[in-house]
Amino acid sequence: MQGSRVAKTPFARALLLVAALSGCNLLPSSGPTARDITRAGTDPSMHIIRVTPSIATASRSGEALGFGSDFVGAGVLSPDAISPGDTLAVRVWENVEAGLLTGAGEKVTTLEAIPVDQAGNIYIPYAGELKASGKTPDQLRQAITEELAGQTPDPQVEVRRVAGDGATVSVMGGVADPGVYPIEIPTRRLTSMLAQAGGVAVVPDVAQIKIQRAGHTGRIWLQDLYDNPRYDVALRGGDRIIVEEDRRSFTALGAATKQARVQFNKRDMSAVEAIAASGGLDGRAANPTGVFVFRDETPEITNRVLGRSDLVGPQRVAYLLDLTSPDGLFAARDFIVRDEDTIYITEAPLASWGRILTLAAASVAVARSVDVIATN
């Protein structure tokens, strides 16, 4: 009888109602609990890996930015080298009365405004199409002389550059003064050309330099360019230099202070730094023993961290971090977050009970209001 009377009190009725809703999973929640995700780990299509310092090291990716041999191996252009887009003037002297190019009574012919096409070639009458790009004016003069020598006795040839607009690069993106710049003696390498454009205007920690050349693209971190003179590559006419911020990002979900897509703020961002960048753990709800990093992992790294060799193709991996122990904090500090990762912070078990009590108290208040109305 006493139990029956207790069950009829407003608080008891409210508590029973909320408990029933909880059993039906109708209470609000930020997502699955750590236990729910761990149970899902029995699915062979997903691997749950508890992160230790050794796992953090083994999961590091070997991906790195850098210029390939086609960029690094390119020599510095001669300041006199002819480039596609240049305009040349050629003068030819002939020691005969009626020469190949000269008119009657004339000894010299001037060919003005000869363009160097995008393939680097020019056309000279009776000499045909000749390769000009990469040669100095004197080297091209010798080539023209050799072609004409078999058709007119002892020709004398002069070659000079009228304009050198073809030997230019485009500098765009995060620089102080983007534009088109000529390749000159002081600006034949990447760093000097960036300085010519006013310097990099992007925060150095997230700045990347990209060069597009003849269908090939090279990309490097600005800091690596500073630290390694090997990457201060020689430029070529037509290069496009693009300075941009790091585009990588991760998504923070669950019991995080801020649930959002977050941009990387440094090159190698640890899990601890990523959690801090998303606002940190929600102190009222977060479960610090259940922080997951979901990732489509490469088979090479998955095999390495699991000590296997049979996995092929991309693998769905949930890395589990425990931030309640020094060892776990060191592991989270060493674990590097990658582009498109999802960091999910599970709720603490007591967070659900807190919502239950809050709803129960609200239900009691409503029940009491109904009783007051009914008695009046």
Image (tube, grey):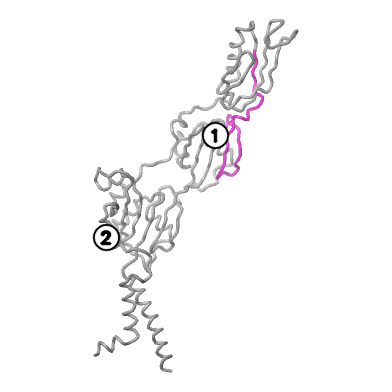
Above/below status of 163 relative to 323 = above
Q: Residue furthest bottom?
A: 376
Image quadrant in which the N terminus is located: bottom left
Count of all numbered marks drawn on residues in the image: 2
Residue 88 in the image: state x and y as whole percent: 65, 22
| Category of crowding for the residue at label 2, using alpha-carbon neighbours closer than 10 angstroms: few (below 14), some (14–19), many (at least 20) | few
Question: Hey, which quadrant is residue 78 in on the image?
Answer: top right
Residue 39 in the image: state x and y as whole percent: 27, 60
Mark 2: secondary structure = helix
Residue 191 in the image: state x and y as whole percent: 52, 37
Image quadrant in which the C terminus is located: bottom left
Give the amino acid at mark 2. Answer: Arg
Give the amino acid at mark 1. Answer: Asp
What range of the chain is rendered magenta?
157-186
Which residue in the structure is indicated by mark 2?
39
Residue 37 in the image: state x and y as whole percent: 30, 60
Q: CA distance from mark 2 to mark 1?
A: 54 Å
Which mark, by number, is residue 239? 1
Above/below status of 247 relative to 12 = above
Above/below status of 3 relative to 134 = below
240 relative to 158 in the view: left or right: left
103 relative to 39 in the view: left or right: right
Query: Mark 2 vs mark 1: which is more N-terminal?
Result: 2
Which mark, by number, is residue 210? none
Taking depth in this image into account, of 51 and 35 the one nearest to the observer is 35
Taking depth in this image into account, of 338 and 226 the one nearest to the observer is 338
Q: Residue furthest right?
A: 105
Question: Hey, which quadrant is residue 195 in on the image?
Answer: top right
| Category of crowding for the residue at label 1, using alpha-carbon neighbours closer than 10 angstroms: few (below 14), some (14–19), many (at least 20) | some
Residue 174 lies in the magenta-colored region: yes
